[in-house]
């Protein structure tokens, strides 16, 4: 997953739309009063839980680093949630993940730093 996120970040960097993405992220920071705190918590989650991705994220331009960390921290949390628990509860955990994704995509994420930051990206 980390490699996919880094490749996506590289694609954005090379894209002619990178200036537009940077402007949108600047606007996000101005309008979303939780963004800075949520990204700081996502960064800490990645620093502790995925050291290789965290270090590799420093190779990204600063304007894409925070969204990449938000995206990957959501993926990391989703993976942890699915892996934890019994095999019998796996279906319920998948249903919960689908609901989290639906909520994030519709702009009403679960009230966690990871879900809010992912939804904002």
Image (tube, grey):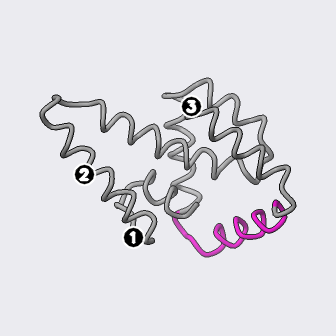
Q: Residue furthest left?
A: 88
Please tell me which of labels 1 and 2 falls first in the chain: 2
Q: Nearer the viewer, residue 55 or 12?
A: 12
Q: Is residue 27 above or below residue 83?
A: below
Q: Nearer the viewer, residue 43 or 83?
A: 83
Question: Looking at the magenta stretch, what is its main secondary structure?
Answer: helix
Label 3 sits on a secondary structure element that is helix
* Magenta region includes residue 114: no
Q: Which residues are magenta?
A: 18-34
Local packing at callout 3 (Cα closer than 10 Å; few below 14, some 14-19, many 20+) is some
Instruction: Determine whether label 3 and label 2 are within 8 Å by CB.
Output: no
Q: Residue at x 17, y 29 (%)?
A: 87
Which of label 3 and label 2 is nearer to you?
2
Q: Residue at x 26, y 31 (%)?
A: 84
Q: How much space separates mark 3 and mark 1, taking CA atoms?
A: 27 Å
Which of label 3 and label 1 is nearer to you?
1
Label 1 belongs to which residue? 108
Label 3 belongs to which residue? 47
* Magenta region includes residue 27: yes
Q: Is residue 79 above or below residue 107?
A: above
Label 2 belongs to which residue? 95
Query: Residue 6 lies in what quarter of the image?
Result: top right
Q: Residue at x 66, y 73 (%)?
A: 30
Residue 72 vs residue 84: left or right?
Answer: right
């Amino acid at each position: 997953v980390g490699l996919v996120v880094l490749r996506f970040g590289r694609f954005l960097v090379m894209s002619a739309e990178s200036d537009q993405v940077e402007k949108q992220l600047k606007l996000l920071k101005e309008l979303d009063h939780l963004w800075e705190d949520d990204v700081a918590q996502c960064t800490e989650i990645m620093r502790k839980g995925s050291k290789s991705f965290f270090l590799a994220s420093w190779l990204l331009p600063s304007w894409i680093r925070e969204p990449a960390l938000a995206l990957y921290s959501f993926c990391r949390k989703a993976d942890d949630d699915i892996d934890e628990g019994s095999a019998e509860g796996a279906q319920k955990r998948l249903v919960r993940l689908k609901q989290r994704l639906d909520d994030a995509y519709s702009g009403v994420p679960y009230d966690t730093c990871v879900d809010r930051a992912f939804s904002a990206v």
